[in-house]
Image (spheres, helix red, strand yellow):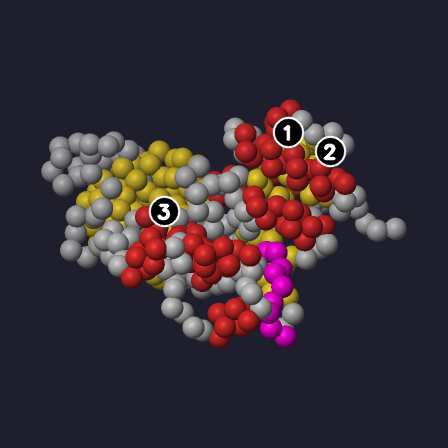
Amino acid sequence: MKPERTVLVVAHVERPAAVRVARIVVDRLTAAGMTVRVLASEAAELGTADTEIAPPTALAANDAEMMLVIGGDGTLLRAAGVPLLGVNLGHVGFLAEAEPEDLSEAVDQVVGGKYEIERRMTVDVSVRANGDVITTTWALNEASVEKGARERMLDLVMEVDGRPLSRWGCDGVVFATPTGSTAYAFSAGGPVVWPEVEALLLAPISAHALFARPMVVSPRSVLAAEVIGPAWGQGETSRAVLWCDGRRRVDLDPGARVEVRRGSQPVLLARLRGVSAGAEGSEVSAPFTDRLVAKFDLPVTGWRGKGDRRQAAQGGTAAQQEAAARRETPAARQRDEEPGGDA
């Protein structure tokens, strides 16, 4: 007798598209003989039968083989502890493994166990006041310290490994993981870091300082930001807000200290296996470079690398053929030949 396999399905139920996709996923997994578990807070919206109902706590993932998350990356980030597989309904969705058009194939691969587990680095975040730890939390993408009032500049002293680095009058600072390098840190002008690189990123937000560039430091480093004031002669002390993954908020008073270090627990991501054109057999999903090209629609016309010739000899995947067709339009050719200004 085969052991029972359970999948926890979590959806962004405020989005009708997510609800529709979730119902399809639940039906397909149930038809394949798998046990499907949904959260009690989402069961009514999903309107599914023959499912287990679990309270909306971390215990919902107990004994589950996988958590399948339907929505944008923001939805994905609230899940942790078991391997996660996301169906992207957001805009960029680097964490999500499947797009809605890939849904059937994605579910089939889950049923067939054709996936591998990828460990993603997290950060542990602590907030101190008068030397005492008052809050602890974590993040997969980033922890950001931001100004609490739109009209007021934030005054921060930055620190790396117990040594002061610089004082910035700014809108804030982003402490990011490699996973978060394509999220808020990217918008703040930080570098794109490949997921397998172990490092911490520090990216200032609109800092009024000569030395205010994004920095990449050792994963063993401890980064800190101290909120001070009055802020550059504004006459009032500056208040700040700590956001973790854009979901968890902590208000910071002047004198507060935010410390960021490598997380003790990684997040596990399920990566589907795609069929390789070479003799190596199967490989996990698409390389990160391909993800960048696809998500940002980067111009690659003219590339004649080994992989390109190999795919071309076999006709390439449907997605690659479609992307190639888009690039062959007159507008796309013009875009490739004449890069736009703010891109």
Residue type at tag 2:
Thr
Q: Nearer the viewer, mark 2 or mark 1?
A: 1
Q: Position of residue 343 (x, y in %)?
A: 28, 53
Confirm or deny contact between disc 2 and disc 1 (CB under 8 A).
yes
Which tag, 1 or 3, sits closer to the chain's start? Answer: 1
Name the residue furthest front.
330
* In the foreground, 333 or 210: 333
Cα separation, mark 2 vs mark 1, equals 10 Å
Confirm or deny contact between disc 3 and disc 2 (CB under 8 A).
no
- Which residue shows up at 50% across the image and 50% down it? 95
Q: Position of residue 245 (x, y in %)?
A: 43, 42
Q: Which residue is mark 2?
A: 51
Label 1 element class: helix
Confirm or deny contact between disc 1 and disc 3 (CB under 8 A).
no
Q: Which residue is mark 1?
A: 46
- Residue 131 visible in the displayed image: no
Q: Is residue 304 above or below residue 76?
A: below
**Quadrant of res 37:** top right
Which tag, 3 or 2, sits closer to the chain's start? Answer: 2
What mark, if any, has residue 184 been given in the picture?
3
- Which residue shows up at 58% across the image and 42% down it? 69
* In the foreground, 225 or 275: 275
Instruction: Report the magenta residues as a range.
Output: 271-279
Name the residue furthest left.
233
Residue type at tag 3:
Tyr
